[in-house]
Image (cartoon, grey):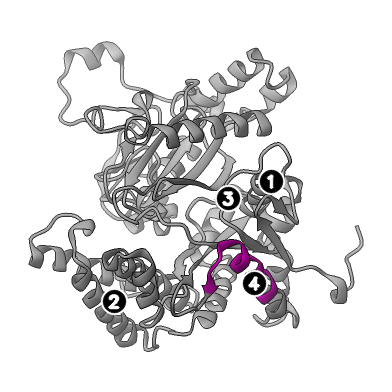
Amino acid sequence: MELKTKKDAKYIYFFGGGKADGNESMKNLLGGKGANLAEMAGHKNLKLPVPPGFTVTTEVCTYYYDHKKTYPKKLEKEIKKALSEVEKLMGKKFGDLKDPLLMSVRSGARKSMPGMMDTVLNIGLNDETVKGLIEKSGDARFAYDAYRRLVMMYSDVVIEKAGGMEPAKGKGIRKLMDERLEELKKEKGVELDTELSADDLKKLVKEFKALTKKYLKVEFPDNPWDQLMGGIGAVFASWNGKRAIEYRKIERIPDDWGTAVNVQAMVYGNMGEGSCTGVAFTRNPGNGDHYFYGEYLVNAQGEDVVAGIRTPLPINNESKNDHSKDLTTLEKFMPSQFKELDEIQQRLEKHYKDMQDIEFTIEKGKLFMLQCRVGKRNGVAAVKMAADMYKEKLIDADTAVMRVNPNQLIELLLPMIDPEEEKKNKPIAKGLPAGPGGAVGKVVFSSEEAVELGLKGEKVILVREETSPEDVDGMHKAQAILTTKGGMTSHAALVARGWGK
């Protein structure tokens, strides 16, 4: 294929309102997430409720690295044009003082790299636009919560990580802000973020900005346009971040593929008790059972589910486990929205002919689909799903065989604890089994130590409160991973399953 001349190259692909410039076959140009968003929004058999937005192509990423981190001349103009399309569909304006449109910026390489690259939510908030958001939503707590998250993510992702600043041992800006958040909850005598008042959160915004200035020596940008361009640049920069490079080495993903950037209108799962956000799979990724499986959080934003900060709730009875057996399912909590989601997941699996990992948000009772991708699964589940889908005539025999990779077959042969011995002994504690098999090793509490001992040939088990993308190297060297927090859809669970840990 010959490359178009730079003059007529198209750098921005729009999706939303029942149409899209791209489709699922364009993964190399739009990245996995962008291609799937276009497919969900625009394919004649789908036309799902996807918040409108646009994808900046992987070619821009390549250009960025070939041209000393600068952009093609006409990129800004194309972004402004696409942004005005989003504004029309949403009936709001970006940076507007009365009813501001907020945007999210997410990465999307052509092969899924869970958590390796960065996301910034709520772009477009500052001390002025936040007043408009309060006015429109009638909820000051929600508005300052969104603002607090923006400052946190922006400082972490755009200023520190993309700026190539190396935090002092494990104490990045995000950690410092998290600690301050925990302190404030203690001071106020509350347990959950959601129990903090609007005034508490307003105070946090000020303190977070001060922390950014003190430790990173830069001001948080108040101009919405600067925030947007900073976010886009940070995703391109995160392609060559330490963790993304480590993950690519392990997964053998070429360095020159680059990543796309998806810019999308924000929808809110944290607009009070009638809103929620969740992650689900069209089949159980832990054992391959054929039922809709997932978790959700009320009054939360998407990152909360994956970060494993609060214990998520099951979407239906089949998704319950020992920890969540008494919690309210989404099916019971919002029956009509659950029914709509259930119908969508069935359509998506039929359409893609494979198990899908989906993210959704319900804003004040309205369902939105944020992404879908082929879901990561462990070996046991891979074999079961391939066989089941063949029996269901969803795929042919050749496809079924190719669905299981050699490492996943090894997982079926992984060491496990003797079931007979297991019956004789009382467990010390119980957890959620996110990955198969049993493991023996020395407990270590940091990824650095796991790498150090792992390289000496020692068997280690990495124990963390929760893992984050910075831990990938340690996770890869460990025999097993144990975390105190997080459900079956947390970062630790996703990565461990993918690697058969």
Instruction: Look at mark 3 in the image and give the residue it sits on.
Output: 50
Instruction: Look at mark 1 in the image and give the residue it sits on.
Output: 39
Magenta region, main secondary structure: helix
For the point 15% across and 21% down, the residue is: 426
Of 404 and 37, which appears nearest the observer?
A: 37
- Residue 488 is drawn in which quadrant? top left
Residue at 30 percent of width and 54 percent of height: 272
How many discs appear?
4
Task: Point out the tag, 1 or 4, that comes first from the N-terminus.
Answer: 1
Q: In the image, what residue occupies the spot 67% across and 83% down?
A: 68
Q: Can residue 172 be seen in this view?
A: no
Q: How far apart are marks 2 and 1 (CA)?
A: 37 Å
Expressed as whole percent of the image width and height from the top left, the position of residue 2 reads 92, 62
Residue 373: x percent and y percent? Answer: 59, 42
Q: What residue type is labelled 2?
A: Val
For disc 4, the marked residue is: 84
Q: Name the residue under label 2.
A: 205
First reached walking from the N terminus: tag 2 or tag 1: 1
Q: Mark 3 Cα within 10 Å, few/some/many (few <14, many 20+)?
A: many
Query: In the rendering, at what x and y percent does residue 289 appear?
Result: 47, 20
